[in-house]
């Protein structure tokens, strides 16, 4: 539902929310906000690493030690169940945020060796939403309370003439091992009812701390306000299984950090950004700026008059 309150004209406001990690488990969420069009572009990249470990002398090792596969799918959606599932994950205290359409790019690869199968999955969902902006007592607010969203169940989409769940860990394992029935059957029997099997990969709940608790910096030269938040430590969700004295594990790893950069000056109030006039420069900064300007003007004048100084008779005047 589009917010019916008129937004006063402003230069485009850009907010970037980023969840970063140095390994394949990194995920990023980028939100571009434009109060003139009242549309937010939400670009989420969920990168998940799923690891299945097994003993080198196990039967399953013989099936997986040489596995190598990859696949990629992409499509656009203007409605339907996929868009609705994303919409449902955004809903919170303020249900005015509405998803209108989205594009999805899904890719995954699997690689097995003597003791582990590693599945790397990337899900890039770009959506366009409205209802983010509102005017409160004449001040523009950007509501970002929905930023720490999670798609809690399967997100089934029709891609390349088949239905694909782009969200759950279990579905990723099944898609990756579709051509290896014995190994897939073993993993499904061992972990099919576990929490990790039924956990979502589109999960940004680690960024659910109020924006007012994030570290804020303002760069007056670039006229940019930045909010940063680092989630300490690496989060690992795993399950174990034992059979005939042999141990197996299935795990999912994440390690996010958050950054928000706003074009213009903004203050955080709980989960909102409030656009405000930039603070006046301090006298010391103004004095330093004036001194730099005077020195630059003097240098420019010196170079100008030096370049016009006549040279000796019969010689050319050289540039300074």
Image: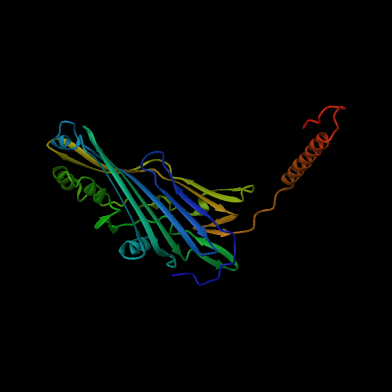
Decide if residue 259 is on the left or right side of residue 239: right
Using the rendered image of the protein, determine whether residue 91 is visible from the camera's viewpoint. no
Q: Position of residue 150 (x, y in %)?
A: 36, 56
Using the rendered image of the protein, determine whether residue 32 is visible from the camera's viewpoint. yes
Q: Nearer the viewer, residue 173 or 233?
A: 173
Residue that sits furthest to the left in the current view: 244
Q: Position of residue 277 (x, y in %)?
A: 64, 58
Residue that sits furthest to the bottom in the current view: 4
Q: Position of residue 115 (x, y in %)?
A: 22, 33
Q: Nearer the viewer, residue 194 or 18?
A: 18
In the rendered image of this protein, does residue 241 appear above or below residue 80?
above
In the rendered image of this protein, does residue 21 appear above or below residue 37?
above
Give me the residue at 33% from left, 45% from top. Answer: 48
Q: Quadrant of the N terminus?
A: bottom left
Q: Position of residue 215 (x, y in %)?
A: 53, 47
Decide if residue 191 is on the left or right side of residue 29: left
In the rendered image of this protein, does residue 221 appear above or below residue 244?
below
Q: Quadrant of the C terminus?
A: top right
């Amino acid at each position: 539902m589009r917010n019916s309150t008129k937004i006063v004209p402003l230069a485009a406001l850009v907010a970037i929310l980023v969840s970063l990690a140095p390994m394949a488990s990194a995920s990023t969420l980028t939100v571009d906000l434009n109060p003139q069009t009242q549309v937010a572009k939400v670009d989420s990249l969920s990168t998940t690493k799923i690891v299945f470990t097994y003993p080198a002398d196990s039967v399953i090792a013989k099936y997986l030690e040489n596995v190598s596969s990859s696949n990629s799918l992409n499509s656009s959606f203007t409605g339907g169940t996929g868009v609705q599932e994303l919409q449902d994950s955004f809903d919170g205290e303020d249900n005015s945020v509405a998803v209108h359409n989205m594009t999805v790019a899904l890719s995954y690869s699997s690689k097995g060796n003597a003791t582990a199968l590693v599945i790397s999955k990337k899900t890039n969902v770009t959506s366009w939403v409205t209802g983010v902006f509102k005017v409160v007592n004449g001040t523009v607010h950007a509501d970002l309370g929905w930023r720490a969203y999670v798609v809690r169940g399967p997100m089934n989409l029709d891609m390349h003439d088949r239905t694909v769940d782009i969200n759950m860990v279990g579905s990723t394992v099944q898609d990756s091992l579709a051509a290896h029935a014995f190994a897939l059957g073993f993993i499904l029997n061992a972990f099919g009812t576990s929490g990790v099997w039924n956990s979502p990969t589109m999960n940004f709940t680690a960024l659910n701390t109020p924006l007012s608790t994030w570290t804020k910096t303002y760069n007056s030269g670039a006229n940019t306000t930045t909010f940063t938040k680092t989630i300490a430590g690496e989060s690992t969700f795993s399950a174990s299984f034992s059979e005939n004295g042999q141990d197996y594990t299935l795990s999912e790893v994440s390690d996010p950090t958050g950054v928000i950069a706003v074009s213009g000056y903004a203050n955080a109030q709980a989960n909102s950004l409030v656009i405000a006039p930039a603070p006046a420069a301090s006298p010391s900064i103004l004095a330093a700026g004036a001194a730099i300007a005077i020195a630059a003007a003097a240098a420019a004048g010196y170079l100008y008059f030096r370049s016009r100084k006549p040279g000796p008779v019969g010689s050319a005047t050289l540039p300074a």
